[in-house]
Amino acid sequence: MTAPDETLDVALRSWVDDAQAPGADFPIQNLPFGVFRHDYEERPRVGIAIGTHVLDCLAAVRAGMFDALSPPVRDALQSWSLNALMALGRDDARAVRRVASRLLRDDTDDGRSAHAMRDVLLVRMDRVGMLVPAEIGDYTDFYASVFHATNVGALFRPDQPLLPNYKYVPIGYHGRASSVVASGAPVRRPHGQRRPDPNAPPVFGPSAGLDYELEVAVWVCGESTIGETVPIARAADRMFGLSLLNDWSARDVQSWEYQPLGPFLAKNFLTTVSPWVVTIDALAPFRAPAFERPAGDPAPLPYLNDAADQAHGGFDITLEVWLSSTAMREQGMAPVRLSSGNLRTMYWTFAQMLAHHASGGCNLRPGDLLGSGTVSGPEKSSRGCLLELTTRGAEPLTLPTGETRAFLADGDEVILKGWCARDGAARIGFGDCRGIVRAAQ
Ligand code: MN
């Protein structure tokens, strides 16, 4: 293990007052990276979240605040996406984090200098637009919750819910990078081919089974070439940070199209990510053992089995889904929580997913995005999509207005939240990952 990291000290305070607010997602111990746009300028800029504000990295470099960093790192901070910083890798991102922490502390000379330049360096979050933080070359979505896989399998294949490969192979599919959007972008209900009557031909029209999927995604850093693998013991070096991800899914389209090659149009119309990338360094206090496989389950094959990964390859992240309907908002009602789970319950770790992804020689590039798959735990209250919560629509949910939901209705807003908390560490959060369903075109 490495030496204690001073940026994680629970006693640190920022001169940005609301960074210390109870329940704040972005205290000085978090410092996630993102890409934002000022309301007066087209050019995107790299930023670091602090309280309800953004540290403008371009402005900070120009002001000499990052002079302690090497020229390539300073160049990356003046870029218009995180790809350049992701290309440099974990160590350089950690160096930025150390300098930013000192700049934002209330008890350092650097902090006092930065505080004096607050109007140049900081911008309020509600005055900027957040963008997808990296240009995503490739997006892959896994299926790492055994509870989700079992629940969904039981709905689609009651005789054989969990296929025999599940406990050996981290199952995934290649998703669509071009339709990954940042939190807040509208969610247009997709059209698709489906077969509501199994004894009649399929029809084409707006999906009647629109669903969300509660997921966490890892942003890849560093570059590997075609033919090169990533040994499981090195996989953590290729993980830059995590964001929340909503893999919007049209269940009626999915159930008709998925065999034999897996999801296609049912999932490629839109995927929403939370715009702040919480670094693996910020998550260090919240590492957890890999999922404890029940007696009788096979051990991971050697290329997916690493002692350090088994000991702390998991993440203790509480994950929640909230929903508000148009009627709820009109009546002034707060969103209602639909479920609460934890990333710890995933059968596969991100390191296993990443090592597996590269194990056949597929290159992984900075800015690639790997989704975890729907995060569902063993309890019904932790099921991470409506397909599971409503048993494919057979047991609709009732909202506080008395409205019912088998699947999402037009006007519904889905909000994913994620946060980490434990004694001896500062609570950190991911910010929202939200989207409102709009009527089909
Ligand atoms: Mn998914």
Image (cartoon, helix red, strand yellow):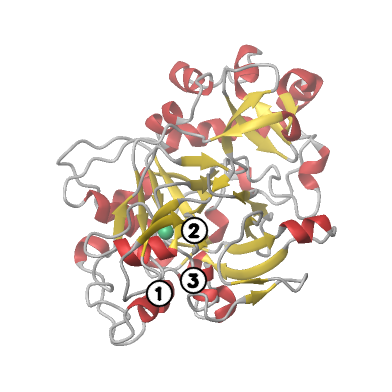
Numbered mark located on residue 152 in the image: 1
Where is residue 301, by image quadrant? bottom left
Residue that sits furthest to the front in the current view: 200
Q: Quadrant of ligand 1?
A: bottom left
Query: Alpha-carbon neighbours of circle 3 within 10 Å: few (<14), some, or many (≥20)?
Result: many
> Could you tell me which secondary element the residue under label 1 belongs to?
helix
Q: Which residue is located at x 69 percent, y 54 percent?
A: 426
Q: Earlier in the sequence, mark 3 or mark 2?
A: 2
Q: CA distance from mark 1 to mark 2?
A: 15 Å
Q: Label 2 is placed on what type of residue?
A: Glu
Say above or below: 38 vs 20: above
Q: Nearer the viewer, residue 109 or 343?
A: 343
Report whether the residue tagged 3 is closer than 8 Å to ligand 1. no
Q: Earlier in the sequence, mark 3 or mark 1?
A: 1
Disc 2 target residue: 215
Cα distance between the residues tagged 3 and 1: 8 Å
Q: How packed is label 1: few (under 14 Cα within 10 Å), some, or many (20 or more)?
A: some
Q: Do the residues under discs 3 and 1 have CB atoms within 8 angstroms?
A: yes
Whole-percent x, y for residue 390 in the image: 54, 76
Spatial CA span between label 3 and label 2 = 14 Å
